[in-house]
Image (cartoon, rainbow, N blue to C red):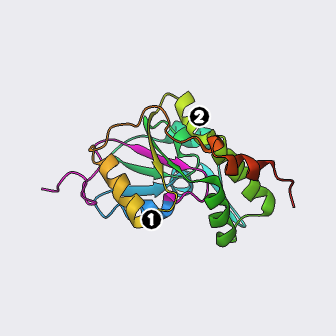
Amino acid sequence: MAEPGNRRTAPRAWFALTGTPGCGKSAAAARLGPGVAVEEVAALAVRLGTARRLRHGVEVDLARTAARFRRRGPPGVVVGHLAHLLPIRNAIVLRCHPIELDGRLRASGRFSRRQRAENVAAEALDLILAEARSRRRRIWEVDTSGRSPAGVGRALGRIVAGVVPPTGRSGVDWLADPAVTEYLLRPAP
């Protein structure tokens, strides 16, 4: 039998793994191991027939995806910055220091300057956390700042195995950091 917190321990419930783009959702989820079913929101929507393929990605009809999503079979983890909007009671919200997040987004090369600024502001203002709370999700917050995907994956494994209780009120307040406030108030280049 697998030990609690072991990466191969299957979750006891469904989890939405969410967070601002660049926080490390997909990289950490990939390290959950073969005992945990993991599916990206876009792949789920394609499988359910609630998405359409575009030239550069997938457009998800979130309302239809939520309506068709059924928690059948063994529980798993649905990953994506929209995952907390699906009918899943448990939400793991990955967090990342906004200045580090900007560096990650720059390094990825996938985002325009405007998109980076929007994502950094969303993280600084706790947007995804607030959305998840407004939907009365059970919340676990995991700060990925300065952590490896493997380390975050281990933390996620303990959460989905039921070893770690929900975090309750947020311990993360990026706006309390004067460097973040100064960063956000800089004029756009």
Magenta region: 1-25
Q: Would you identify the image quadrant in which residue 166 lies?
A: top left
Q: Quick check: 42 above or below 89?
A: below
Residue 182 sits inside the magenta stretch: no
Residue in view at x 44 percent, y 65 percent: 149
Residue extending furthest toward the front: 178
Locate the C terminus and report the quarter of the image it occupies: bottom right
Please state if 157 lies on the left or on the right of 186 as rendered: left
Mark found first going from the N terminus, 2 or 1? 2
**Foreground pick, 142 / 26:** 142
For residue 58, say whether it is visible.
no
Q: Quadrant of the N terminus?
A: bottom left
- The residue where tag 1 is placed is 149
Task: Determine the residue positioned at 27% across, 48% down.
Answer: 161
- Amino acid, disc 2: Ala
Give the CA separation, mark 2 to mark 1.
24 Å
Residue under the image location 63 percent in, 46 percent down: 177
Kindly identify which numbered label has been placed on residue 172: none
Picture coordinates of residue 85, whole percent (x, y): 56, 39
User: Residue 59, image x and y in percent?
Assistant: 67, 54
Q: Amino acid at mark 1?
A: Pro
Examine the rendering and report whether any part of residue 92 can be seen.
yes
Residue at the far left in the pictured view: 1
| Circle 2 residue | 130
Image quadrant where residue 37 sits: bottom left
**Disc 2: CA contacts within 10 A as few (<14), some (14-19) or many (>=20):** few
Q: Residues within 10 Å of mark 1 (few under 14, many from 20)?
A: some
* Horizontal and vertical percent position of residue 114: 80, 57
In the rendered view, would you say 129 is above or below 4? Answer: above
The prevailing secondary structure element of the residues shown in magenta is: loop
Secondary structure, mark 2, is helix
